[in-house]
Amino acid sequence: MNISVKILAPVNPTEIQGKVEKAIMNFFPVELKLQGSEIQELSGDGDLESLRTLHLRLREERILDTARKIFLNGINGDTTRFRLNKQVACIGKLNFPPGEESLGSIHVEISAENIRDLLKVIDWLVPETIDGKPVEEIDL
């Protein structure tokens, strides 16, 4: 299964680059590059392995239902997109803001070769639940 993950987060002049890096690395162990001129952005690319920390943290924080709804609503073709709150991610917690935040969010894009593979990744990351407990855990 060929999965690609792209992460992008602005680094505003009022922010410390290391804190934005930490916010991303708390969930996505990817190599980050700084790009841009006026407003700089940290970006990184990963694969299925770079989603394993997120997989674990979604269970620890018990937010599978919320995350599943967000991931499914973010589907466009064979890609899903969602945002994470940068400031909350810096302390190692997950929060999905309803819109773009004033300091910018962490933008995450997960793509697959086809919709079937994408839905399988989503089922692995955020399975359906009953009373907050996964109905079935699959391995990838």
Image (cartoon, helix red, strand yellow):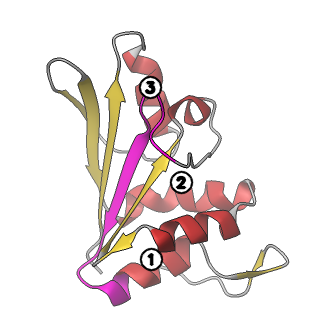
Q: Which secondary structure lies at badge 2?
A: helix
Give residue 103's mark: 3
If the image is split into quadrants, where does the N terminus sit?
Answer: bottom left
Vertical relation: 135 (above or below) 87:
below
Q: In the rendered image, which residue does mark 1 sit on?
A: 121
- Disc 2 crowd, CA 10 A, few/some/many (<14, 14-19, 20+): some
- Disc 1 crowd, CA 10 A, few/some/many (<14, 14-19, 20+): many
* Amino acid found under the numbered disc labelled 1: Val
Q: Which secondary structure lies at badge 1?
A: helix
Q: Quadrant of residue 24?
A: top left
* Amino acid found under the numbered disc labelled 3: Leu
Q: Residue furthest left?
A: 37
Front label number (2 vs 3) = 3
Q: Horizontally, is 54 left or right of 12 in the view?
A: right
Q: Residue at x 48, y 34 (%)?
A: 101
- Disc 3 crowd, CA 10 A, few/some/many (<14, 14-19, 20+): some
